[in-house]
Amino acid sequence: MISRLRASFSSIVAAERGHARLSTLFYSSLFAEHPDFRGLFPPALDQLGHRMFRALQFVIDNLDDEERVLGFLAQLGRDHRKYGVEDRHYFAAVNSLLGAVQGAFTQAIWTPSLTTAWTELIDLILHTMADAAAADDLPATWGATVVDHERCLDDLAIVRLETDSPIPYGAGQYLSVQVPQRPRMWRYLSAAIPANPAGQLEFHVRRVSGGWVSPAIVNETRVGDRWLLGSPLGGLEVDRDCGLDVLMIGSGTGIAPLRAQVMEMAMRSHNPRVHLFVGGKYPCDLYDIETLWHLSLSNPWLTVVPVSEEDENPWWHTAPAPEAPPGLHQRLLGQPGRVVAQFGSWADRQIQISGSPAMIKTTLYALQRGGTPPHLIRHDPLI
Ligand SMILES: Cc1cc2nc3c(=O)[nH]c(=O)nc-3n(C[C@H](O)[C@H](O)[C@H](O)COP(=O)(O)OP(=O)(O)OC[C@H]3O[C@@H](n4cnc5c(N)ncnc54)[C@H](O)[C@@H]3O)c2cc1C
């Protein structure tokens, strides 16, 4: 059954604009049958459709790891409460999703066994999401106030908030965020510090050129803005029982969930060894390297290795690159994944990768090519 599901989904992935066709078919059928559902979603559906496709891809890719898939779907169900999605919406979506998969399928014949396999999978997805949402007694959303907005680079800001009540997220997790400048356009951001009883929260946000939300956060956020946050998602965490040391590779704002985890580890007395590679295109993209150097100076289990693809900052960035304190690793040159892979197979580590989807894919490829077994590697879903 798994191979049948994978083969049929690959045909959609391989088709030109297959992902867009799947999501268009899904939403048009859903809203045709239930016009009242339209008001739950933002006016532009492209991001939502893209995320739905990526979520399906994640489920299909991990079908042989039931625990991972069910955990992911449960988080997604809890997160969907922010839209006001309820049980009846899930059950109404079954036929639309099956019809969309069938309509986007590009191989010659859609067989009855495919109908059975997809019906079972869709049932599992929607039931797991609905059950997790119904069982969750935490709020669907949390309010938070911006208390600081620091523009570290022209296109990058650190935003600090205080939540109305503490959010119980784990270091390494990400949250859905809605900002007042872009109502109903939820985006995921990774928490850059561990949860704390004061409800302080920090996000590192890079402006994506042409994006809807990130330019508004970087350019327009003001102290006092009220943000809305959804329930925590993601499973990046250090396994303290497996006996393996840790390799973390982060690039750009992708360092946020890794930083939160090493900060949390710094509060404990015993930790596995951690090698943290911090990457960026230019030296200035290592905007938080000094915090990480400070952490490594007081925590001997932590080794921080800066990596940049270019040796010089771009001409418009005039501040000099920070120098590594004596005894710490000097900056290495290259794409982070390739630099890490040059050190060998890392087959004796638990590994986390965090960054843009392109960086994650390149790093995965470089590590696997260097002999690292894929089951040791974790990253957030590319959604
Ligand atoms: C698990 C997870 C955690 C995340 N954590 C963070 C974080 O801590 N900090 C942070 O800044 N961002 C983070 N992101 C990315 C963030 O959720 C948004 O996707 C990003 O800010 C762009 O949103 P936007 O509305 O500006 O662009 P959109 O309007 O959503 O997209 C506009 C265009 O830009 C493209 N695009 C989107 N993201 C990127 C990108 N990274 N690089 C290049 N092109 C892109 C889109 O495909 C689209 O074509 C995370 C994403 C995920 C899935």
Image (tube, grey):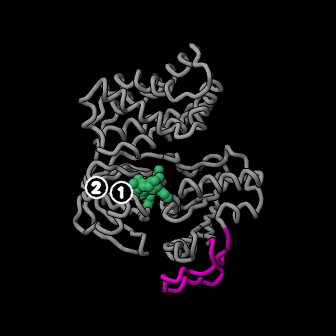
Say which of 127 and 308 sits in front: 308
Evaluate if marks 2 and 1 touch, with contact meaning CB atoms under 8 Å apart: yes
To which quarter of the image does residue 353 belong? Answer: bottom right
Residue occupying the point 24% across, 57% down: 180
Residue occupying the point 69% across, 45% down: 374
Q: Main secondary structure of the magenta part?
A: loop
Ligand 1 - quadrant of the structure image: bottom left
**Badge 1 element:** loop
Name the residue carrying label 2: 182
Say which of 362 and 139 sits in front: 362
**Amino acid type at image mark 2:** Arg
Rendered location of residue 44, percent (x, y): 33, 45
**Amino acid type at image mark 1:** Trp
Rendered location of residue 118, percent (x, y): 52, 22
Is residue 115 located in the magenta-colored stretch of the structure? Answer: no
Is residue 310 located in the magenta-colored stretch of the structure? Answer: yes
Q: Farthest top residue?
A: 112
Question: Is 151 located above or below residue 125 in the figure?
Answer: below
Question: Is 30 located above or below residue 280 in the figure?
Answer: above
Residue extent of the magenta highlight: 309-334
Report the disc number at residue 364: none
Name the residue carrying label 1: 212
Q: Tell whether circle 1 marks a residue whose Cβ is less than 8 angstroms from ligand 1.
A: yes
Q: Tell whether circle 2 marks a residue whose Cβ is less than 8 angstroms from ligand 1.
A: yes
Q: Is 277 displayed left or right of 82 in the figure?
A: right
Residue occupying the point 36% across, 45% down: 231
Q: Earlier in the sequence, mark 2 or mark 1?
A: 2
